[in-house]
């Protein structure tokens, strides 16, 4: 079996030879094909360490130093106006005040004492301006690059296996954030621990997209390639509105931009304009695709003034966008526009967004792969839990099939129009939740968003035949019967409830559980969504139904599968461990 989704031990090969048969009773370890030691001086250790360094550039408008950060909340006086800064979003308030008049002298006074966070995550209380300036003086000078890597970050939690001098696992350390990772890797750099990183892990780029990596070589390559993908804004000033016209024009034209937040005349219009997509063309033409597929054409132009870069938008039938907007902040994959405090647009780059939607293009998208019901809300009531592990398959003869417990429920579908909007209508026996004429309001390569009045559905593309990790996961699941060796539900150990229960997975997508004189059947699906997941959906059994979740695959081998379920804040709610029967 390949090593792409196993726990990869970052220790030299000679150390692996120390694992004798007597040690296998303590822990079973498979040697990776391309091992690299997680040692004090290894490249991978240095790259991970740089990623964990505290980035202080976000608040440069307050402290003018990228090597430290001011802990929030903090009180400042901006041009005579006292403001409490509670979050990074409040930095834009300071910038708006600075830019209100072009010919005034901007001034910012910090109310001390404050707490400063250094690049090593150490916190220091600063009592006055002189002490702060002395601390800043120890940092690198203006326009010098710092050591941190800001264009990519780990999605936590991640975990390390820790070994003793005999290379036996003595602990598994879970890391929940940059500060913990920094301190753990500091111990590695000081040769205090021997450790391995447990794969797969997910990393997030500065633009919000993610990538899953499966071994130490992939991880090192991914971090190195991402290092220069964004502007780290380490020039010790603030914002990124010092774009030249040429740079801004090229940045706008590189991909479609999707509206993420919209405010006009001090009214929040985000719900009206969210996910409108804009495509900036070479000839000053901007094409906007509204939700539902309506396409509007307008013009755009840019210029640079003492106030910074300006973007002018003009549409005949969309006056809310018609302004000369100030480009007040540019992050990797995101642009923020404003015009006085009453008008604001935040747009995110989305190279997968489809602007020119046609009926044929929608049908081609649907027929290319399977589709998961990622989100389903009917009149505000969530229904997506009913479709865990049950993918849809669309065929070219207008037939759609839903896989449930290994059986295919057949129905029909139609891609049509309603006014200027495209629609998707499905009819499946026993599935009234799907039997609506859904308006297609957002389409990208791997995602379709649909709505019908107060009902919403999101379909995510699922292509297991082209995903080596999913093939390998499926092969492991199908190969054995499994037993539950650990089940923790909201901190309570409930493993004993599943004693003597056997679990299995069929190639058809049917899941089964046998125990206590009962046979329970359901659906299962391994899939990728910002990481690797296993969806389980059993029916009509009070005990086994408690496992019905979209589980994140934390660790998998031929003999052990560890799964976790997280809440919306990223906290672990449940842990489920299967081991080979």
Image (spheres, rainbow, N blue to C red):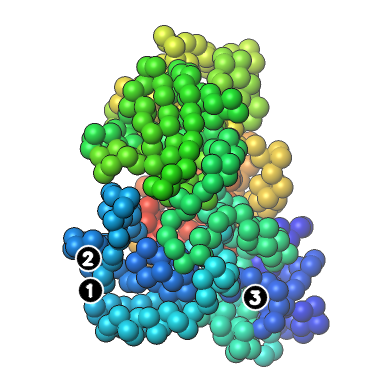
Mark 3 and mark 1 in contact? Answer it, CB < 8 Å: no
Q: Residues within 10 Å of mark 3 (few under 14, many from 20)?
A: some
Q: Answer whether residue 287 is visible to the viewer in this image.
A: yes
Cβ atoms under marks 1 and 2 closer than 8 Å: yes
Task: Give coordinates of residue 327: x percent, y percent.
Answer: 42, 44
Near mark 2 (Cα within 10 A), the count class, few <14, some 14-19 or many ≥20, is: some
* Nearest to viewer (mark 3 / mark 2): 2
- Camera-nearest label, 3 or 1: 1
Residue drawn 68% across the image and 50% down it = 469
Task: Please provide percent x and percent y for residue 525.
Answer: 57, 42
Q: Disc 1 versus disc 2: distance between alpha carbons?
A: 8 Å
Q: Secondary structure at mark 1?
A: loop
| Among the 4 quarters of the image, the one containing residue 539 | top left
Residue 77 is left or right of residue 576, and the answer is: left
Instruction: Identify which residue is drawn at 69% across, 89% down.
Output: 166
Q: Which residue is mark 2?
A: 77
Q: Is residue 128 left or right of residue 387?
A: left
Left or right: residue 344 versus residue 530 is left
Q: Residue at x 71, y 40 (%)?
A: 466
Spatial CA span between label 3 and label 1: 39 Å
Query: Which residue bears the numbered disc 3?
Result: 45
In primary-sequence order, the first of circles 1 and 2 is 2
Q: Which residue is mark 1?
A: 111
Say if residue 461 shows up in the picture: no
Task: Please tell me whether residue 278 is drawn above or below residue 512 in the rendered image.
Answer: above
> In this view of the protein, which residue sits in the foreground, 57 or 373?
57
The quadrant in which residue 432 appears is top left
Q: Nearer the viewer, residue 413 or 267?
A: 267
Q: Name which residue lies at 34% across and 85% down.
A: 131
How many other residues sit within 10 Å of disc 1, few (<14), some (14-19) or many (≥20)?
some
Whether 461 is drawn above or below 60: the answer is above
| Disc nearer the start of the sequence (3/1) | 3
């Amino acid at each position: 079996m390949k090593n792409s989704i196993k726990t990869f031990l970052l220790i030299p090969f000679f150390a692996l030879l120390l694992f004798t048969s007597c040690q296998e009773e303590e822990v079973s370890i498979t040697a990776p094909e391309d091992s690299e030691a997680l040692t004090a001086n290894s490249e991978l250790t240095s790259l991970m360490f740089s990623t964990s360094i505290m980035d202080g550039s976000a608040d440069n408008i307050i402290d003018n130093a990228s090597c430290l950060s001011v802990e929030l909340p903090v009180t400042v006086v901006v041009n005579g106006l006292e403001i409490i800064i509670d979050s990074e979003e409040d930095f834009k308030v300071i910038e708006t005040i600075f830019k209100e008049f072009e010919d005034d002298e901007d001034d910012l006074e910090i109310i001390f004492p404050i707490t400063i966070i250094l690049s090593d995550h150490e916190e220091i209380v600063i009592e006055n301006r002189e002490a702060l300036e002395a601390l800043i003086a120890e940092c690198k000078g203006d326009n010098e690059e710092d050591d941190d890597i800001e264009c990519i970050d780990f999605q936590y939690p991640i975990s390390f296996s820790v070994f003793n001098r005999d290379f036996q696992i003595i602990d598994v350390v879970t890391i929940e954030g940059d500060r913990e990772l920094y301190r753990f890797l500091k111990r590695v750099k000081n040769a205090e621990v021997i450790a391995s990183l447990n794969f797969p892990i997910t990393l997030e780029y500065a633009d919000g997209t993610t990538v899953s990596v499966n071994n130490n070589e992939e991880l090192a390559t991914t971090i190195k390639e991402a290092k220069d993908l964004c502007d780290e804004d380490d020039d010790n000033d603030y914002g990124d509105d010092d774009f030249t016209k040429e740079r801004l024009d090229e940045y706008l034209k590189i991909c479609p931009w999707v509206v993420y937040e919209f405010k006009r005349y001090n009214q929040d219009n985000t719900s009206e304009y969210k996910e409108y997509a804009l495509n900036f063309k070479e000839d000053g033409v901007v094409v906007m695709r509204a939700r539902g597929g309506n396409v509007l054409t307008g013009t755009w132009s840019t210029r640079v003034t003492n106030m910074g870069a300006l973007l002018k938008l003009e549409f005949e039938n969309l006056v809310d966008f018609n302004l000369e907007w100030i480009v007040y902040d540019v992050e990797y994959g995101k642009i923020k526009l404003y015009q006085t405090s009453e008008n604001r647009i935040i747009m995110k780059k989305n190279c997968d967004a489809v602007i020119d939607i046609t009926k044929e293009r929608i049908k081609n998208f649907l027929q290319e792969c399977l589709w998961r019901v990622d989100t389903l809300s009917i009149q505000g009531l969530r229904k997506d839990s009913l479709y865990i592990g049950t993918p849809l398959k669309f065929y070219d003869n207008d037939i759609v099939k839903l896989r449930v417990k290994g059986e295919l429920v057949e129905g029909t579908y139609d891609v049509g129009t309603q006014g200027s909007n495209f629609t998707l209508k499905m009819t499946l026996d026993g599935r009234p939740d799907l039997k609506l004429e859904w308006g297609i309001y957002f389409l990208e390569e791997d995602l379709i968003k649909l709505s019908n009045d107060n009902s919403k559905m999101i379909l995510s593309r699922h292509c297991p035949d082209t995903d080596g990790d999913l093939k390998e996961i499926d092969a492991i699941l199908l190969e054995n019967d499994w037993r539950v060796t650990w089940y923790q539900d909201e901190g309570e150990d409930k493993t004993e409830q599943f004693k003597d229960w056997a679990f299995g997975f069929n190639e058809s997508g049917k899941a089964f559980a046998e125990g206590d004189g009962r046979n329970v059947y359901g659906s299962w699906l391994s899939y990728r969504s910002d990481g690797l997941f296993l969806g389980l959906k059993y029916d009509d059994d009070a005990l086994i139904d408690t496992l019905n979740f979209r589980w994140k695959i934390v660790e998998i081998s031929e003999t052990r599968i560890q799964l976790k379920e997280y809440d919306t804040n990223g906290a672990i709610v449940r842990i489920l461990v299967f081991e080979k029967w």
